[in-house]
Amino acid sequence: MEWSSRRSVIRMNGDKFRRFVKAPPRNYSVIVMFTALQPQRQCSVCRQANEEYQVLANSWRYSSAFSNKLFFTIVDYDEGADVFQQLNMNSAPTFMHFPPKGKPKRADTFDLQRIGFAAEQLAKWIADRTDVHIRVFRPPNYSGTIALALLVSLVGGLLYLRRNNLEFIYNKTGWAMAALCVVFAMTSGQMWNHIRGPPYAHKNPQNGQVEDSKLIHTMAFRSTLDVVLRTLQVGNFCQSINDFSKSYIHGSSQAQFVAESHIILLLNAAITMGMVLLNEAATSKGDVGKRRIICLVGLGLVVFFFSFLLSIFRSKYHGYPYSFLIK
């Protein structure tokens, strides 16, 4: 494999995989990323994982410790579907280590669901399996610095233009809305999304697509209009909620979809609005009839959307016994 030393990641089809990875004897370890990068597969997390994998492979290829003891390879589903079938693999992306001797053990499959696919985490796993330590070098990324500079410039410019009237800085309602936005974003899991990079939603696999039994990669996202139409067409509302959950709510308490965090954010916002209306109805001194209507609307928002939120909690934490209105 002298030719491979020129490449950070070696692309393999079924024949090359069986020749260089499966066939003994070997005096080197092989890290294989099984993925589905073709656009028709619509696997966004595959592309994100591939970027981290390339960073790790380049760090190894151009390090002073580089040797022929370890190689990084990739098998795309559209180039090596027979390899996926041979290994009974039904999810992507998946990282596996093939040792020089013997068959891969359970620990030779990287726990992507629990650890994520950051290059640093992959490097730790490789060090544990091969005793090869890789120091990850990332290319410089100034987008964060540029974005921060633009934000500071924008805020500074607005303050300068309004320098003669800065009363808006002391607006309690504005600060309260800003604080609520931050709270909704954090409690809905946006930071987790930023760190883990989950798919937007899940859709049952169709012709030719890699089956996603672990719900790792995303398929095509069904629009909100489609969800509304399905809800109107299904006579049983609870059944439509269940269908909705299968596409946009992850079935495990250890993971979530991006769409799921958006749903949780909206539910929390609706419940908060209901509480605000209840407080308004109790503290205002307006017309009694109007206050009664506000109270009923607020109570309806809290009851319905809290029930919806509780049903999502039950779907993720299996065995949770309590429900309210929506099961």
Image (spheres, rainbow, N blue to C red):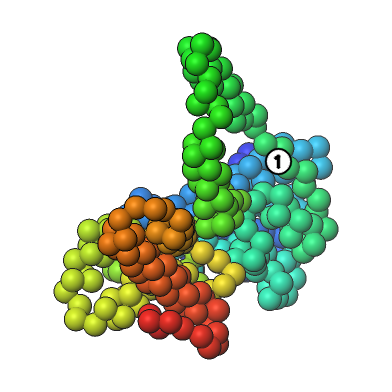
- The amino acid pointed to by label 1 is Ser
Q: How packed is label 1: few (under 14 Cα within 10 Å), some, or many (20 or more)?
A: many
* Residue 104 seen anywhere in this rendered image of the structure: yes
Where residue 139 appears, x then y in whole percent? 64, 32
Does 309 appear above or below 73? Answer: below
Q: Nearer the viewer, residue 52 or 102?
A: 52
Left or right of 172? Residue 239 is left
Where residue 257 appears, x then y in whole percent? 47, 61
Where residue 163 appears, x then y in whole percent? 53, 12
Q: Residue at x 32, y 64 (%)?
A: 292
Does 132 appear above or below 147? Answer: below
Quarter in which the C terminus is drawn: bottom left
Q: Quadrant of residue 228?
A: bottom left
Left or right of 259? Residue 24 is right
Residue located farthest toward the left when viewing the structure as drawn: 233
Q: Nearer the viewer, residue 318 or 110?
A: 318
Does 294 appear above or below 39? Answer: below
**What residue is pinned by disc 1?**
59
Left or right of 218? Residue 140 is right
* Residue 86 seen anywhere in this rendered image of the structure: no
Secondary structure at numbered mark 1: helix
Q: Residue at x 59, y 69 (%)?
A: 254
